[in-house]
Image: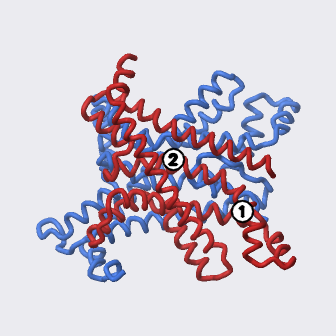
Chain colours: A red, B blue
């Protein structure tokens, strides 16, 4: 037991910096995922056929490819092709683009959940298409998008661990744990605290989503 | 774009047995995914039953177990097990494993890989099953009890068949995630598709061991990616079809499970419009 606390106290700076790097990785990737996901999601619901096809191709490709393969392509593959992007950019862009496919699907189902009838009703009342989107569709879609988006944040926290360990692209929590372990060999203690770090993040995200969800339902 | 589609850069695909080498690696991933899936389904069902137990202590303990493992990164679990499983166990495994098993299965870290995949996925599947059962109306259990069925009879005959039916889409989407996640065990040095791809990129151009044709990393890993995309697309098509048929037949909606990567597969089962 005393070992456990000793490890935490002695290596607190490393654990903390790893924890913060993980948070940053997730935050940056989340912004990328939401921005790209919104664009692709919008493509998926336009009346234009080729735009829908393009969006569909993006979603099916990035959703079904392993994140690790994406990391290899974006870091080592592009480097070999003469396009040098930094480890941080490669890591966050891969995680962001990967998750964007799921965000796009979330957006699409959120828009579809609103129902064609409401859109038609809005249009027939003489609202312009943009007004229908901004006044009728989006406010309702946001509500149904929050819970799956929360799930994606949790998945991103877990997936971010791949960036640091597999290719060494960032010194995140798991990478730090591995480094500390290679110096101390106190595997159980080190990984216990790393697990606590990850659980703090994922459990906080779970409760945040539940809170948001409840608030949005009450307002309805 | 020119670089990507330059035939020169794709020549490796048809030279020597590069492509077959990639495919054998990919086949290992599929096999490992299948093994892990079967194990995860078994342990997941046990965990779900424990979670649904009437005994409060059992239910809470199972709940904590499930929530801890499904909220940790899978790569974290695999790495931890690889470091924490003592060497004698690894050696015992290596001695005990039948020789006709594929080379990847002979790796001393294979145990850690499969245990990690199972630990994580059984927790996720347990949560999916629990949500499926929890989404049933309470009346189902009460009705089963009132016609004189015991707890286990009610579970087996009434609750589980309906609850499990609702979890089919979520389970298939988890199978897709599991299939992708098998690439993570390459960090333990197990010879699967990622390792095979690395070998091709580093040796194919070599005049001594390779075919003398340079295999660019980008194209090789893109090929690996496409392999996963094809198999996973087929899986998701299958699940979509199963789900539509089920819904038409029974009219049930699927339950929502929080914290899943592919939340949508679950939500898509609820009728649109």
Q: In what element is the residue under mark 2?
A: helix
- Residue marked by disc 1: B244
Residue B101 appears in view: no
Query: In which quadrant of the rendered view does residue A202 lie?
Result: top right
- Rendered position, A61 above or below B27: below
Subunit under mark 2: B
- Circle 2 Cα neighbour tier, 10 Å, few/some/many (<14 / 14–19 / ≥20): many
Q: Name the residue furthest top.
A: A2
Subunit under mark 1: B
Judge by depth and name the residue closer to the eye, A42 or A185. A42
Judge by depth and name the residue closer to the eye, B233 or B4. B4
Residue B85 placement (x, y as % from top left): 34, 31
Residue A22 placement (x, y as % from top left): 43, 46
Q: Which mark is residue B37?
A: 2
Q: Residue at x 72, y 52 (%)?
A: B254
Residue B112 placement (x, y as % from top left): 37, 39
Q: Name the residue furthest left.
A: B208
Judge by depth and name the residue closer to the eye, B87 or A60. A60
Query: In which quadrant of the rendered view does residue A123 lie?
Result: bottom right
């Amino acid at each position: 037991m005393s070992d456990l606390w000793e490890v935490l106290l002695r290596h607190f700076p490393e654990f903390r910096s790893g924890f913060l790097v993980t948070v940053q990785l997730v935050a940056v990737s989340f912004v990328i995922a939401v921005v790209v996901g919104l664009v692709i999601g919008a493509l998926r619901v336009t009346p234009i056929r080729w735009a829908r096809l393009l969006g569909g191709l993006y979603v099916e490709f990035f959703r079904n490819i392993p994140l690790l393969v994406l990391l290899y392509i974006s870091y080592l593959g592009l480097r070999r092709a003469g396009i040098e992007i930094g480890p941080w950019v490669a890591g966050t862009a891969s995680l962001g683009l990967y998750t964007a496919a799921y965000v796009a699907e979330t957006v699409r189902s959120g828009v579809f959940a609103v129902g064609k009838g409401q859109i038609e009703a809005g249009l027939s009342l003489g609202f312009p298409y943009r007004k229908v989107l901004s006044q009728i569709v989006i406010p309702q879609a946001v509500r149904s998008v929050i819970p799956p988006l929360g799930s994606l944040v949790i998945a991103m926290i877990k997936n971010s661990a791949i960036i640091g360990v597999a290719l060494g692209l960032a010194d995140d929590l798991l990478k730090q744990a591995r480094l500390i372990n290679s110096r101390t060999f106190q595997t159980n203690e080190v990984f216990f605290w790393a697990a606590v770090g990850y659980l703090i993040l994922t459990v906080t995200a779970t409760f945040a989503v539940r809170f948001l969800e409840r608030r949005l339902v009450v307002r309805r | 774009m020119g670089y990507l589609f330059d035939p020169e850069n794709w020549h490796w695909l048809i030279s020597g047995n590069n492509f077959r080498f990639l495919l054998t690696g990919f086949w290992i991933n599929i096999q490992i995914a299948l093994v892990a899936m079967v194990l995860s389904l078994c342990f997941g069902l046990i965990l779900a039953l424990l979670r649904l137990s009437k005994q409060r202590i059992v239910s809470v303990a199972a709940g904590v177990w499930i929530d801890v493992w499904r909220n940790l990164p899978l790569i974290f679990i695999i790495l931890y097990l690889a470091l924490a499983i003592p060497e004698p166990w690894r050696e015992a495994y290596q001695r005990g494993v039948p020789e006709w098993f594929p080379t990847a299965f002979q790796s001393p870290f294979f145990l850690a890989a499969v245990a990690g995949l199972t630990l994580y996925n059984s927790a996720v599947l347990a949560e999916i099953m629990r949500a499926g059962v929890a989404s049933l109306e309470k009346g189902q259990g009460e009705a089963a009890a009132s016609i004189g069925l015991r707890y286990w009879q009610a579970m087996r005959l009434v609750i589980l068949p309906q609850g499990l039916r609702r979890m089919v889409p979520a389970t298939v989407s988890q199978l897709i995630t599991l299939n992708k996640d098998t690439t993570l065990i390459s960090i333990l040095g197990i010879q699967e598709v990622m390792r095979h791809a690395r070998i091709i990129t580093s040796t194919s151009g070599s005049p001594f061991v390779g075919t003398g044709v340079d295999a660019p990393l980008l194209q090789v890993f893109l090929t690996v990616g496409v392999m996963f995309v094809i198999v996973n697309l087929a899986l998701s098509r299958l699940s979509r079809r199963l789900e539509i048929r089920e819904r038409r037949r029974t009219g049930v909606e699927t339950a929502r499970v929080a914290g899943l990567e592919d939340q949508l597969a679950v939500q898509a089962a609820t009728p649109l419009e």
